[in-house]
Amino acid sequence: MAASASVPPPPSTPPTAATGRRAPSRWIAPLGAAVVAAGAGIGLGWLLWAGPDNTASGTGPDDAAADAAGACQAWSRVPALSKVYSDDETSKAYFVRVGGAAALAQSAAQLDRRYSTLDKAFQDVTRRLQTFDVKGAEAVAAHEKVSTLCAGLDD
């Protein structure tokens, strides 16, 4: 029989806890409660002061109006369609902005048929962007039609 390995002796002193400083656990719950209370206060203030006439409130039947207003706000920062296609980063942002505005206009039209004309005008613009038909009188007219419809929303 082979001799078995001997078992090492137990340590002379028991292991001690690390001496690093820990955050006191008594502060975690009050800190979490303060963050939640601050968030609730901001949300409550937004609800109280936004009001039903504010298009940003986005409640009930005003959802369609908020979507249409958002589409037109994005559209107001789009130059002529011929400037959307170029090799710089700004033109890429214009292209994406037109797509976002068109999606909001479509959402508004689905919620309220009064916005279907705006939706169709945006569809014409996005079709022109997809087919690279962005120059000429028809492209200018498509751009102006959306701008005119958006200006009519402010009335």
Image (cartoon, grey):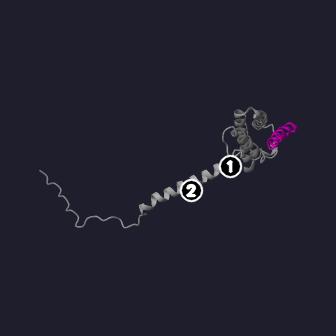
- Specify whether residue 42 is painted magenta: no
Q: Main secondary structure of the magenta part?
A: helix
Residue 120 x, y percent position in the rendering: 77, 33
Say if the magenta span includes residue 154: yes
In the picture, measured across the screen, residue 93 lies left or right of residue 149, that is left
* Residue farthest toward the left in the current orientation of the protein: 1
- Foreground pick, 149 / 11: 149
Amino acid found under the numbered disc labelled 1: Ala
Find residue 50 and name its label.
1
Considering depth in this image, is 13 or 43 the residue closer to the camera? 43
Give me the C-alpha separation between circle 1 and circle 2.
18 Å
Please give left or right for residue 34 compared with residue 47 in the image.
left
Q: From which residue to which does the magenta span run?
A: 135-155
Of residues 11 and 51, the one drawn nearer to the viewer in this rendering: 51
To which residue does mark 2 refer?
A: 38
* Disc 2 element: helix
Q: Determine the secondary structure under disc 1.
A: helix
Residue under the point 78% across and 46% down: 76
* Rendered location of residue 88, percent (x, y): 74, 50
Residue toward you, 104 or 129? 104
State the residue at coordinates (71%, 37%). 108
Residue 113 versus residue 147 in the image, above or below: above
